[in-house]
Amino acid sequence: GLYKAGDAGGRITGGSGYLEIVAPTWTNIASGNWSVGGNWRDGVAPNAGGRGSYRIAYDTTPYPGISTNNLGSDFLLNRLEFGSSHAALAVTGNSLAFTNHGTALPQLNQNGANSVTLQLDITLRSALTFGGTGTGIMTNTGAISGKFGVTKNSSCITVLTGANVYTGATTIVGGTLRTTTKDSLPTNTTVFLPSTVAGTLDLAFIGTNLVQGLVINGFTLPEGIYGAGTG
């Protein structure tokens, strides 16, 4: 983004020059590690522990393969973005910790037509939104933990396959959230489906997933067992 002289807060003086803050952007066309500077647009790897201001982006070059976070566990970031040009991609390695940056809440955005698989754990230090405008399936195979919740508002299918233990709400306002095991939704979460048209919960497993509550279109459902025939 750009910060101009005259914006609120501190002051920048000078003529017509600007400072541009550049997000760490992966440009390697093959598999590789986050610690290698040459895998990033500006030739510099991110800080080992991450930063709350980081927006890690995969949005400039079509690349297949695996991108591995071999930096610190609970790598801090605010956003993880997958652009419209990426090929099928997997991100693996050490865990990510999503946190807010000022008033900017965390986002994990899928903007492409090809699949993305996150093969790592996620820690929620603030509420996380699965967003984006793409149609490619996004799958998370690791565990999501933390005292905050997740919101799904993208049009694509987001798949949770891990044993998740976050304690905040699960809100589905767009697209499909697919769970593939009876542990994919934490027992302490309340599931919100604000609209029966825009958001879908796809229970793609055999068995029963115990949750704290279920609210559909503003109505809190009583204790019971609910599935495709009742939602």
Image: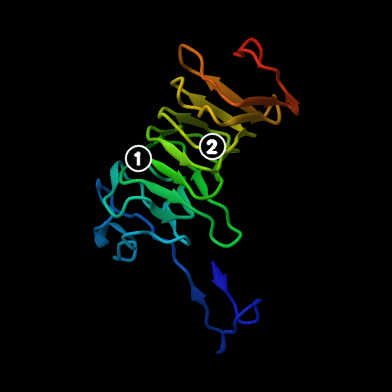
Quadrant (top left/top right/bottom left/bottom right) for the C terminus: top right
Q: Nearer the viewer, residue 60 or 121?
A: 121
Q: Position of residue 160 (x, y in %)?
A: 45, 30
Count all numbered tags in the image, as a single digit: 2
**Left or right: 190 in relation to 48:** right
Q: Position of residue 90 (x, y in %)?
A: 33, 39
**Left or right: 223 in relation to 100:** right
Amino acid at circle 1: Leu
State the image quarter where residue 76 is shown. Answer: bottom left
Extreme right residue here?
218
Residue holding disc 1: 120
| Residue shown at the point (38%, 40%) measured from the top left | 121
| Residue shown at the point (60%, 26%) measured from the top left | 212
Q: Position of residue 87 (x, y in %)?
A: 36, 40
Residue 78 has which mark?
Answer: none
Quadrant (top left/top right/bottom left/bottom right) for the N terminus: bottom right
From the viewer's perspective, is the residue at label 1 or at label 2 nearer?
2
Describe the element under mark 2 as helix, strand or loop: loop
Q: Nearer the viewer, residue 190 or 151?
A: 190
Eyeballing the image, is 205 above or below 220? above
Amino acid at circle 2: Thr
State the image quarter where residue 191 is shown. Answer: top right
The chosen color scheme is: rainbow
What is the CA distance from the residue labelled 1 to the residue labelled 2? 19 Å
Q: Nearer the viewer, residue 60 or 179?
A: 179
Residue 167 has which mark?
Answer: 2
Q: Is residue 108 visible?
A: yes
Crowding around mark 2 (Cα neighbors within 10 Å: few <14, some 14 to 19, many 20+) is many
**Left or right: 231 in relation to 139:** right
**Left or right: 171 in relation to 209:** right
Q: Is residue 59 visible?
A: no
